[in-house]
Structures are given as C-alpha cells and as structure tokens.
Amino acid sequence: MDLLKNYSDESETEDEGPKEEKDTEGNSIDKSSFSKMKSDAGEQFNVVDFFGLNDSDEESEEPPVKKTRKFQLESQKGTDSYVEVPDSNFWRNFTPQENPEDDNNLLEKTKVEKGPHAEAYQIRTQGSQVYHQTKVHPRSYQASGQVSEYVTKGHGHCNTPNDLAGQTFNRTPQSQQRFSSHTESQRQLFYVHSKIAPHLMKNNIHNRYPRQVEKELGDHTQTVNRVMWNNPPYCHLFLSASMDGTVRIWNIWTQLSPCVKVLSFHKKAVKDAVWSLDGRHTLSCSYDKTAKWIDVEKGSVLSTFQNTSFVTSCKNHPSDPNLSITGCQNGIHCWDSRSSESPCRTYTYKDSFGQVQDLLFNRDGNTFFSAGSEITQDSADRNIMAWDFRASSVLSNQIYQERYSCTRLKLHPTSGHFLAQSHGNYIAMFSVNRPYKMNKAKRFEGHKLSGYSLGFDISPDGSLVLSGDSNGKLFCYNYQSGKIIQKIPTGMDVVMDVSFNPVLPSTVVICGWNGKIQVLN
C-alpha cells in the first residue's frame, strides 16, 4: 500500500514542465539547444518530421516548394545517373480539362454508334465546341488489333484490354481527322483470324449451303460487280469491285468498321478484281482502260497496265506470281508486274470474238480459257476459246456451240471440268482437256439471268454450286445430280456475284445491283 501511495503517472500530471531531450550519449539537453543544433547542421543531415513534433517555438521562413526530387541511380557500368521524379506538390497548380458533359456546359449529346465493346457519342457544348467521345465497356476483346484501335482513338496507350475498361475519351474535330487517318494506317489486316484458325488444319471440310444472313453492308454507292474471298490464311478478308470506281477490302468479324481499306485508284467503274497468290495484293481492271497491281496493306499502286480499250476481266497466273492476263475488246494481254510499260504477250484471233467477259486458267497454267461476248446470227464458234499460254495460239474455238454468250467461268476444285454461266439461263459443264467437250447430260438450270452479267461459285469440296439470280435469289445446286437444293431469298433486286469462303464450311458472300453486300452463313 505504501508503494501505491508513492506511485504517480507522469503522463497524467498536468503541471509537468517541458520535457528534456537527450543526446546520443544519454545527456539531457533542453529543446532550445536542440533547435540550435539542427540549425547549425542544416546542410549535413535532414530531419524527417511527419507530425510536427520537433517544430521550434521560433517561426522560420518556409523554403521554396520543390516540385521534383532528384534520385541517384547506380548503373552496372559504374557511372552514376540522376532522375527527377515529381513529388506531391507537382500537381498543386494543375487545372483539369474542361468536361464537355458539365451541366452548365453541355448543350447536346447524341449517340452515333454502339457496339459490344464501346459506345460513341457526339457532344456539342455551349461554346459551339464539338467533342467526339468513345466510352469503352469493361469486357475483353477478341483480337489484339481491336485494343490498339481504341487506344489510338482515345489518345492513350495500354498493355492489356482491361486497362481501357470503363474509360471515356474525348476528341475535338481538329484531332478526330488526324487520329482517324492514323488509325486506318496502323490497322492490322493480314493475320490469322480467330474465326479462321480452327479450320485451317482440317483436311476434309464438308460444305453446306447457307441458311441466314449474318451481315449486310451498304457502303458502295453503285452496282457491285464482283466479290471474292481472300486465300488462306487471310480468308477473313474479301474484296468487292464496284461501278463507283472503288475496290473495298472487308472484314466483318471485327468490332471496328468492317470496311478496312478503300482502294480508289481507278477513274471509272471497276469491272473485275482478284487477289494475288500471297493474298496481300489485288489486281483490278476498269473502264478507264487500265489494270492496276495494288499493295493492299500500304494502299499504293505498284504497277499500272495500260490497255487500248475497256478492261473487263483479269486473272493471275496460278504458279507464277509476277504474271497476269487481262481481257479487252478482241484481245488478251499478258503482263509482268516487274515491267509494266508494255505487255509481254498478246493473244489475238483472225476473227472478232468481242469483249472478253471472263478468263480462266487450268491448274498447271499452260492453258487458259476465254469467254467472248460476240454472237453472230449463224455461228457461235467463238463463245468459249482455249489458248496456249506460252505459244499465244488458239487451241480450240469450237467448245460451246449454242448461241448464248457466257458471263463467268469457274474451274471445279476436284474433277477435271470447268463450268460456264450462260445467258441461256443455265450453267454448262465442259472438260478441261481436249477435245473440251460439253457434258450435255448435266446442266444447272432454274435461275434467270435476264441479260445481267451474273456470277456463280463452286464450294471448296466441289459438292455445291451456287448461282446468282436476276430475281434476287440465291440458287443452291447439288453438283452430282444438278438438281436445286435450296432457293434462298436475299432481299436484293439482282444477285450479281457469289463467292464461297475457302475455309469456313457454309459462309458465302454475295453482292447486288443496288450496291448491297451480304454475308450468309
């Protein structure tokens, strides 16, 4: 009890005087002398005081605020380097950018586009300033190219798609054009798409006819003459040649704009276009009397082949990537992309065979066939002609004897035959070897051409034949029997051309007289 009476808690004493500080040797010093020691050794050491416990009674002047701090870095070579890092005072005078969605500033906000990964808005403020806003949804992307697209539009950079989730980016009209052109130039085109990759290793693909419209495109302003899928592994892309003078490259399996390239190098309507063997170039022919060899990725013309009349058909050699042929009025020219000043070969005939509607190589490239447009009243011996590619001579002009011109030629992928679309409202079959006889026992009929230059295609496994129709339907035939399997209404006025995807089992692209393009699956 005596010990408890003498016990006292120093923390509870109210009249306690100022505490004494102790130096490193344990000697007690008062607070004023401690402040003097700090001032004398000011440049020798810095005392970090987080809570202001060591502040002196005397007021001192505040040092100037430093916005950066310098840190010394040690390198492996032994040389010292310094880097300045902003401290907490760096953002003291920062003024945030004006928010266009402020209640006092917002005048109008219109949604212009909505997708599964982003929403686009156009915002007009009180000061007549227009913002283009992109808001990214918090979900993953299917392709790495889509991430870089939204990063470029949003003025930012990130390593993972999730870094963009929930963010909103504003663009003014001055920056919108600059960033849109930059986006198009940086957009990746040639890669193995996730929809194509699982089917590339399959050897036996059983094709079937499409059942529904997957996508409809309407960027062309005039008739689309030709559509064609690219070669594997880039067959997620297809081209379209139109009377508006453009060749467009499409990729419908993307969250960005499906039109990935617009090739506007012709002055007049484009009649035909094909892909190169490597799938990175296109050969297009036009009514401006030229054929152009174009690099799709760079968007530039590599060679221009000047003809004497309208160029209505073109084909690439199946084994030599530098050679191609073009058809015009009563003539066929062979071109070498390494020397485009003049054709390396010219194919002519003693009689007129009219405007060349289509050209077709056989598998080895030693022979090709041409379909002419000229039909006389008493003869039709020059409808389809066979040519020797090396010798530039005619092998046969008595292949198709009926008085109908043919608009399209297609080589069957598995058998030794080729098919021809005839204005007699049927598709005829011929042998690719001499004497190039027509199979009169089998023909694919039921669709109508009505004078249009309609196309058709054969499935990669050779089991189906798909043809366009002047009434806006897609006709599906069985190749073995020649009978109609299905008539698919498309909603178009005239189905001008058909192309079967070389990898996907039931994906087809068609084009119409009204400029529409549909992808069916």
Image (tube, grey):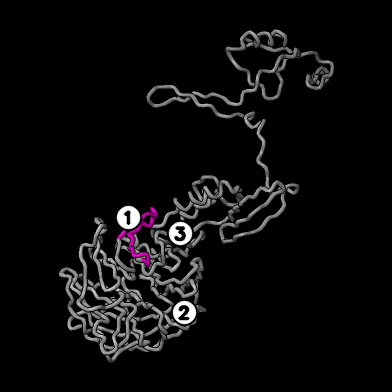
Residue lying furthest left in this view? 391
Residue at 38% x, 85% y is 477
Magenta-highlighted residues: 286-305
Q: Quadrant of residue 506?
A: bottom left
Residue drawn at (48%, 67%) of the image: 220
Residue 497 in the image, given as x and y percentages of width and height: 40, 75
The N terminus - image quarter: top right
Q: Is residue 1 left or right of residue 178?
A: right
Residue at the (25%, 87%) spot, across then down: 379
- Asked whether, in this view, residue 432 is left or right of residue 444, the answer is left
Viewer-nearest of discs 3 and 1? 1
Quadrant position of residue 282: bottom left
Q: Tell me, for residue 151, which label it has, or none.
A: none
Q: Which residue is mark 1?
A: 302
Q: Nearer the viewer, residue 190 or 292?
A: 292
Q: Is residue 175 above or below residue 30?
A: below
Q: What residue is disc 3 on?
A: 260
Q: Is residue 151 visible?
A: no
What's the amino acid at mark 2? Val
- Determine whether the residue tagged by mark 3 lies in a helix, strand or loop: strand
Is residue 447 among what the camera can see? yes
Q: Amino acid at mark 3?
A: Val
Please tell me whether residue 65 belongs to the stretch shown in magenta.
no
Percent x, y for residue 366? 19, 71
Q: CA distance from mark 3 to mark 1?
A: 20 Å
